[in-house]
């Protein structure tokens, strides 16, 4: 069965861009006789209070777009033990290392950048010795990154067509867990899509560049069947809450 999902980050009330993402995912799955699951991506509970998640659920029910999955839906903030298991698995493979770089270091003018301005991590902390890690840990809690290979990941998106990235050149080693212990989006979304049986992902094209690293985690580390990807430019600026967006309850 085709299984899509709508996975909002409830950092505010639902707005028209959120609705566009949800409607496209819902229509795509339903047109194929499938189902749509709801996942609340509230990893950062300070930024995503439960009241906004409750409001989104109420709005979807009012719009007739209620999810087909479990009630209540999946909340990422309640799944840290699950993410920890997969984090530990990657660690046992020798792919995870602590990163002590500050925000200013990561965004320095001398740091590698993509053509769109995104920072590509240079691997500064990848080769730290145990002694260096112990020394740096005395003054700063580390974030944790996964080491990626020099490999090009290519796929055919259902709307955007062919897309590819070299993980080392275009992405760099990426975060799995923040310094405050919150698991990163890239790990959580792959684990959840795999465990929930999601096999079609419809989302805004602002997340197109995240897809290669997620496919690498799917294929190489979680050994899961790859989902179908479809990035929709119409929703690209609206899938995330942003200042000035028209909220549904205000219309």
Image (tube, rainbow, N blue to C red):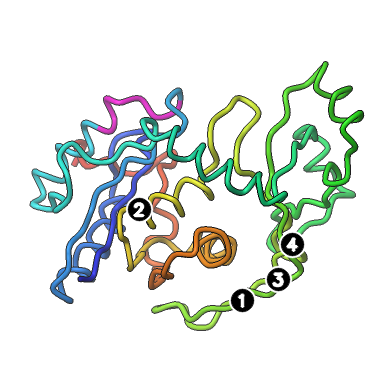
> Is 193 on the left-hand or right-hand side of 162?
left
Inter-mark Cα distance, 3 to 4 = 12 Å
Are circles 3 and 1 on residues that touch, CB within 8 Å?
A: yes
* Nearer to the camera, 169 or 113: 169
Residue 46, position as x, y percentages in the image: 45, 23
2 vs 4, front mark? 2
Q: Is residue 197 magenta?
A: no
CA separation, marks 3 and 1?
7 Å
- Residue drawn 35% across and 36% down? 10
Mark 3 and mark 2 lie on one chain; the one further toward the N terminus is 3
With respect to residue 22, does 98 lie above or below?
above
In this rendering, which labeled residue sits more in front, label 3 or label 4?
3
Image quadrant for the C terminus? Answer: top left
In the picture of the structure, the residue carrying the numbered disc 1 is 164
Q: Secondary structure at mark 2?
A: helix
Image coords of residue 92 (percent x, y): 65, 46
The tag on residue 166 is 3
For label 2, the residue is 195
* Residue 189 drawn above or below residue 73: below
Where the N terminus falls, by quadrant? Answer: bottom left
Residue at which label 4 appears: 114
Q: Is tag 3's residue or tag 4's residue first in the polypeptide sequence?
A: 4
Could you tell me which secondary element the residue under label 3 belongs to?
A: strand
The Cα–Cα distance between marks 2 and 1, rounded to whole angstroms, is: 25 Å
Q: Nearer the viewer, mark 1 or mark 4?
A: 1
Residue 240 image offset from top left, x and y in percent: 42, 47
């Amino acid at each position: 069965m085709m299984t899509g999902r709508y996975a909002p980050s409830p950092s505010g009330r639902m707005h028209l861009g959120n609705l566009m993402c949800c409607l496209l995912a819902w229509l795509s799955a339903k047109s194929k006789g499938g189902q749509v699951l709801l996942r609340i991506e509230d990893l950062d509970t300070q930024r995503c209070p439960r009241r906004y998640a409750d409001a989104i659920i109420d709005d979807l029910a009012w719009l007739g777009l209620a999810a087909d999955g479990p009630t209540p839906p999946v909340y990422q903030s309640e799944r840290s033990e699950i993410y920890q298991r997969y984090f530990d698995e990657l660690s046992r493979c020798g792919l995870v290392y602590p990163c002590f770089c500050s925000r200013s270091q990561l965004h320095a003018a001398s740091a590698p950048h993509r053509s769109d301005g995104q920072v590509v991590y240079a691997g500064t902390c990848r080769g730290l010795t145990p002694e260096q890690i112990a020394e740096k840990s005395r003054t700063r809690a580390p974030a944790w990154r996964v080491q990626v290979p020099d490999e090009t990941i290519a796929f055919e998106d259902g709307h955007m067509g062919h897309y590819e990235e070299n993980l080392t050149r275009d992405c760099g080693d990426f975060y799995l867990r923040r310094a405050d212990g919150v698991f990163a989006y890239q790990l959580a979304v792959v684990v959840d899509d795999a465990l929930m049986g999601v096999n079609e992902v419809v989302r805004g094209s602002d997340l197109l560049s995240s897809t290669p690293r997620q496919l690498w985690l799917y294929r190489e580390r979680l050994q899961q069947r790859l989902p179908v990807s479809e990035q929709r430019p119409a929703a690209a600026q609206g899938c995330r809450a942003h200042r000035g967006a028209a909220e549904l309850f205000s219309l």
